Image: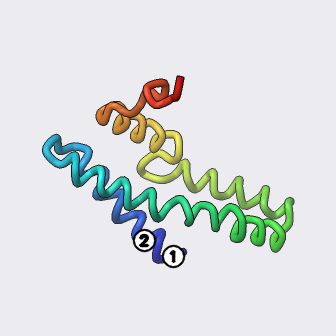
Amino acid sequence: MTAQHQAGRRVTADVLRLAKVEASRKQLAASLRSFIRMYEPHAAREDTVLFPAFRELVGEKELAKLQDVFEDKEKALPHGGFEKMVDEVAKIEQALGIYDLAKFTPA
């Protein structure tokens, strides 16, 4: 899982770099596919194995305390935390023409 987190950071950096270069759409698409290929099973493992085991290990009260600590730490990050990153992702999606989900929704 740690190796995948590191790989995910590298691929994310590539995606951010390539999203700014018009001529690199094929490379960007390849980077996005590789991220998706890794991320889907990774997130599934976290959701079905890691997080439930952690929740059971620490208990609900301690988990609530940890969530508050993580939220404070996230807000202190230089990039502004989760909400800031959501805005950045939205800008990238708009630049790529994939922001409007209605375009991809079956009729």
Disc 2/disc 1 C-alpha distance (Å): 6 Å
Q: Is residue 11 above or below residue 16?
A: below
Q: Is residue 104 above or below residue 45?
A: above
- Figure quadrant of the N terminus: bottom right
Label 1 Cα neighbours within 10 Å, binned few <14 / some 14-19 / many ≥20:
few
Tell me the residue at 51%/76% (across/down): 2
Tell me the residue at 44%/36% (across/down): 87
Q: Please give the label number shown on residue 39.
A: none
In the visual, does 97 lie left or right of 72?
Answer: left
Tell me the residue at 83%/69% (across/down): 56
Residue 55: give x, y in percent of width and height. Answer: 79, 66
| Residue on which the image places disc 2 | 6
Q: Secondary structure at mark 1?
A: helix
Q: How is the image coloured?
A: rainbow
Of 99 and 61, the residue lying toward us: 99
Res 48 quadrant in image: bottom right
Name the outermost residue toward the front: 107
Of 14 and 73, the residue lying toward us: 14
In the visual, does 37 lie left or right of 57?
Answer: left
Tell me the residue at 63%/51% (across/down): 71
Residue 32: give x, y in percent of width and height. Answer: 36, 53
Q: Give, as a three-letter code, the residue at label 1.
A: Thr
Q: Please give the label number shown on residue 2.
A: 1
Name the outermost residue toward the left: 23
Q: Secondary structure at mark 2?
A: helix
Of 5 and 49, the residue lying toward us: 49
User: Does the CB distance between marks 2 and 1 fall below 8 Å?
Assistant: yes
Q: Give, as a three-letter code, the residue at label 2.
A: Gln
Residue 102: give x, y in percent of width and height. Answer: 48, 24
Residue 51: give x, y in percent of width and height. Answer: 71, 65
Of 62 and 44, the residue lying toward us: 44
